[in-house]
Image (tube, helix red, strand yellow):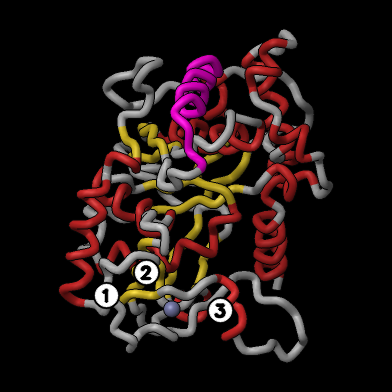
Amino acid sequence: MKQQGLKTLVATMIGLGPIFSYLTGMMQIHGTIAQDSLTRFAPSPTGWLHLGHVASSMFVWGVAGRCGAKVLLRSEDHDQSRSRREYEVGIFNDLAWLGLNHANATFNADQPADFRQSDATPRYLAAVEVLRKNFLVYGCDCSRQVIARDMPQRPDGGVAEELCYNGRCRSRGLALDQPGVGWRVEIPQQEQTFNDLLLGPQQQVPARQCGDLLLRDRHGQFTYNFAVVVDDLEHDVNLIIRGQDLTAATGRQLWLAAALGGPRRQMQYLHHPLIVDAQGQKLSKRFLSEGLAARRARGESPEQVLGLAAHLVGLQPRPSPIGATELPSLFQLETHV
Ligand SMILES: [Zn+2]
């Protein structure tokens, strides 16, 4: 009985991750992380580096530093309509200013990202061919409005968290090379499970969350879910650290990775709180999205920016300045091998 009470208390504390860190001064990571792990920081160059990115970077570099993992930088510019090279240069220069070092072999301001999704089209096309050997990949020209209209009404009249595609085009036989046609892969009704290093055990059924997965959209752009899985497999990334807004995408990415032959190493996931969630209050979008260059111009130091982001995301009780090399001290690992 006593043990049960303790378990409940621990479970409650785990659920209150950010608050738990206030009690111990550290955020507890539940699980083991191999020392030779590789994680990545993969911003989309669609704007300047801001506090949300900085908060995420602290989990990436902090946990990596704590367990001896390396960090790879990747530019996720799969959305070519919004990505700009000047943002990419700015983001990677800001990371260097913050003192966040990475494992990429080369770094210079003209060519900051060693890995850029817009350079990887042949790799994505090859991955589609791998999928076609074992799964149905078909053309789909449905708009978001059509998909939303096809969705069944919820009994409570509420709105679903995301669009779930019902397979409308599965048997239409649309040619994949036709303009205005996206590519989807049929996914089975299978449950995917994983143990999140912060959130604990997770179960997801992608076929019920999003339906057949979109690989390439109607405008010819490879999708985030597809590109990121192909890239992580290619780069042998085995530790995924990212915001909790992407927790729901993990099951479908696990299925896709397995369908493409599977990762060489055991994958591990950590989905961290976002600034707004951790704060429990809405900070202005302007405050959150302000670029680091503006903060730098006001005379803020890297330590001040890191300290503020650490506070806002629940990693420290006050916005005390903290240096990049001190970030690992914010995390407590159960054990590591
Ligand atoms: Zn369709």
Image quadrant occupied by the C terminus: top left
Q: Which residue is mark 1?
A: 175
Q: Which residue is mark 3?
A: 146
Residue 132 position in % (x across, y down): 20, 72
- Viewer-side residue, 45 vs 20: 45
- What amino acid is labelled 1 in the image? Ala
Image quadrant occupied by the N terminus: bottom right
Mark 3 CB near ligand 1 (8 Å cut):
yes
Residue 28, compared with residue 219, is above or below; it is: above
- Viewer-side residue, 226 vs 217: 217
Q: Quadrant of ligand 1?
A: bottom left
Number of the label disc, if any, that sits on residue 181: 2
Q: Which residue is found at the position 74% from the left and 11% from the top?
A: 298
Report helix, strand or loop for mark 2.
loop
Q: Magenta stretch: give its range.
A: 82-99
Q: Which residue is found at the position 50% from the left and 53% from the top?
A: 197
Q: Is residue 103 visible?
A: yes
Number of the label disc, if any, that sits on residue 326: none
Q: Left or right: where does residue 125 sit relative to residue 296?
A: left
Residue 268, compared with residue 88, is above or below; it is: below
Q: Is residue 335 visible?
A: no
Residue 331 position in % (x across, y down): 57, 36
Can you name the residue that lies furthest to the front here?
A: 179
- What amino acid is labelled 2 in the image? Val
